[in-house]
Amino acid sequence: MKLTNLDLVIIGLFFLLMLVIGIYAYFRNQNAKDYFVAGGNLPWWLSGISHHVSGYSGAVFVAYAALAYTHGFSVYVWWAFTIGITVIISAKIFPVIWVRLRKKFEIQSPLEYLAQRYNLTTQQIMAWSGVILKLFDIGAKWAAIAVLLNVFTGISLPVGILVSGGISLLYITFGGLWAVVITDFTQFIVQLLAGLVMFIVVLMRLGGMGSIFTLWENLPAENSQAFHEPYGVGFALAFLFINFLAYNGGQWNLATRYISSPDEQQASKAARLSGLLYLIWPLILFFPMWAAPVLLPGLDDPSQSYGELTLLLLPSGLVGLVIASLFANTMSMTSSDINTISAVITRDILPVISKKMGLEKNSLTIARMTTFIFTLATIIIAFQYEYFGGILGLIISWFGALVGPIAVPMLLGLIPAFRRCGPLSAIGSIVVGLLTFIITKNTDVGSLAVEVSLPLILSSLTYIILGMITKGPVPQKVRDLLEAVHQTQN
């Protein structure tokens, strides 16, 4: 079954709306501060929604749909629940710290404070490694969107890459963070409508509201359990730790949402809103995926379950809405990443290469040029999907491995208890985390939980132990930074 003309019109209108928002946001940017951190004026409700939708891509409807089909309720517990809990519990800690870093040290990039917290070398190592790996990660996501377009519309993969990547290139370059967060809000509304439609249609097909509870009687008993091996308690605890770091700023684009908040109170409210959305919304979003084995028994490829359900249950027009929501999720994450990576390049890397790049009068022009060139590079890499093949997948895995080790010195370095952890601790933790990842990927460790958590655990232990054995006084610049972000507000 192919999409109808009405479905294609709806998808086309969605892409057109993204462009219109980019043009609108263009006029809200007077300087780089507006472009990268919305001038520090991002309202809490917009920040919270953007933090939420920027935290996951269309993989939810493919990879996680497959796990919902085969393993049931457990995918909510180890993924959405652990994110929601850790973001809410941390709402008065890291969101507050990120806002104070912007106010007191005028940061526009999540890595900008690292030169003072550690030294320039440490900052540059973290900046360059993250930027290079994100180049391939985002390129892979353009290719993934193109695959979706190909499956549902039949257009070729190169054309699909040009459509999704090209439109994103324009609206991000035009509008900066304002364009990203406004499109995030729009994309969330699209996702909300599409998700509710699917939820209601599946309920009706299963017999009404009671099927929320009776569905599980028609599924394997393990599908209703909170923990379903290999996604057991250990795996969920590992993800809790990973998500604690990633969603409090270890994923740089999510830190930007807090940095851009007007004050500490609004940053905390944004975190609570995002956390609540993670606790509540996936229960509705995943329900059709949990019901898929009943409605589509014996699927050879469970990763296609959500797409198959869409084509089976929805009429013309609504199918286009659901497909648009799949694009929305991935474009939200990629555009958010691009804006933050451009901030890192513009604020942290280019001024080190040439002091002229740091001149305030050129800041907005340089910001737009950096965004355009970086986005174009990700699109070019996406075109090479056949050439990269398995290597591209490997690089994506490596980025996932580095999220934790890079997040350890970023976030723990902001806590006074770890004030003695200096450049050696930071670089050591990154190296140990990466080496551990390589070993666990090439060795049968016998447990998925161990494989997932060991790089982050050893990275954290390395950071802490090297800090404990460090002798001498804590540098004054480090004491000043920690005092500034932890002082009690009047």
Image (cartoon, rainbow, N blue to C red):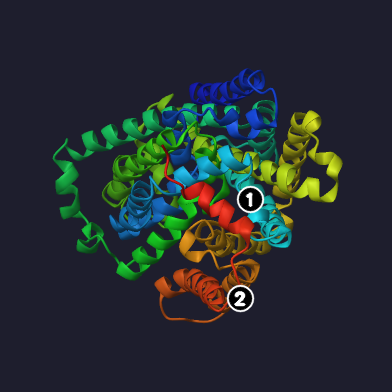
Label tally: 2
Q: Residues within 10 Å of mark 1 (few under 14, many from 20)?
A: some
Q: Position of residue 462 (x, y in %)?
A: 54, 75
Q: Position of residue 250 (x, y in %)?
A: 53, 54
Place residue 430 in its image quadrant. Answer: bottom right
Look at label 1 and name its amino acid. Answer: Leu
SS state under label 2? helix
Determine if residue 178 is in view. Answer: yes
Place residue 234 in its image quadrant. Answer: bottom left
Q: Nearer the viewer, residue 289 or 54?
A: 54
CA separation, marks 2 and 1?
23 Å
Task: Give the residue drawn at x 56%, y 34%.
Answer: 153
Please tell me whether residue 442 is drawn above or below residue 124 in the rendered image.
below
Which badge, 2 or 1, is on the more N-terminal residue? 1
Q: Position of residue 19 (x, y in %)?
A: 63, 23
Q: Quadrant of the C terminus?
A: top left
* Residue at numbered disc 1: 111
Task: Give the residue drawn at x 65%, y 19%.
Answer: 23
The circle on residue 50 is none
Look at label 2 and name its amino acid. Answer: Leu
Q: Nearer the viewer, residue 129 or 389?
A: 129
Q: Nearer the viewer, residue 334 or 458?
A: 458
Task: Give the side of residue 349 with respect to residue 96, left or right.
Answer: right
Q: Residues within 10 Å of mark 2 (few under 14, many from 20)?
A: some
Task: Give the residue drawn at x 56%, y 62%.
Answer: 409
Q: Nearer the viewer, residue 438 or 291?
A: 438
Depth check, mark 2 against mark 1: the one in front is 1
* Residue at numbered disc 2: 435
SS state under label 1? loop
Q: Position of residue 311 (x, y in %)?
A: 41, 36
